[in-house]
Amino acid sequence: MEAWGVPLDPARLLVAELATNAVLHGRVPGRSFRLALVVPEPGVLRIEVTDTRAEALPVRTATTAPAESGYGLLLVGTLADRWGVRLGPVPCKTVWAECGFALLGSAADRSQ
């Protein structure tokens, strides 16, 4: 990410939350998940996590009582500029989040 000029925050929090959700809710024994980081246009980072449980779609839960978990998608929704789910190819789904960032220049520029 440094080579792309992408700041670590909030990207690392989004990666951690989406990857954790894939492990907890999208895991099929013997299969893992795929993480992709892409800069589709200058100033935008797209984080994609693909797993093999298309039937287990993310659900935003509004909790009124304090809880130890269940805040992940609230966090994603707060940190990302936009996020969503893309189905396919069967049996997969991809949960993605995009966040904008200020261009920091090249790695060489930052080291001076």
Image (spheres, rainbow, N blue to C red):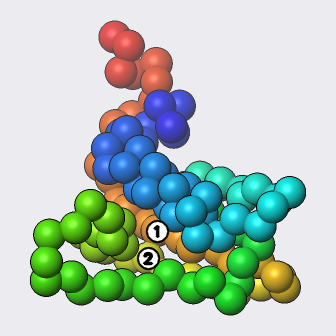
Residue 12 makes an appearance in the image: yes
Report how far apart the C-alphas of labels 2 and 1 lie in the structure: 4 Å
Identify whether 60 is placed above or below 51: below
Q: Residue at x 58, y 70 (%)?
A: 25
Residue 98 position in % (x across, y down): 44, 66
**Residue under the point 37% across and 39% down:** 8
Amino acid type assigned to the residue bearing label 2 in the image: Trp
Q: Quadrant of residue 28?
A: bottom right
Judging by the rendered image, the residue that carries numbered circle 2 is 83
> Residue 51 lies in what quarter of the image?
bottom right
Relative placement, left or right, of 29 versus 24 is: right
Res 38 visible = no
Q: What's the residue type where badge 1 is placed?
A: Ala
Toward the viewer: 98 or 55? 55
- Name the spot of residue 52 as percent of width and height, x first: 77, 72
Tell me whether circle 2 and circle 1 mark residues in contact (CB < 8 Å): yes
Establish if 28 lies above or below 32: below
Residue hosting label 1: 97
Q: Residues within 10 Å of mark 1 (few under 14, many from 20)?
A: many
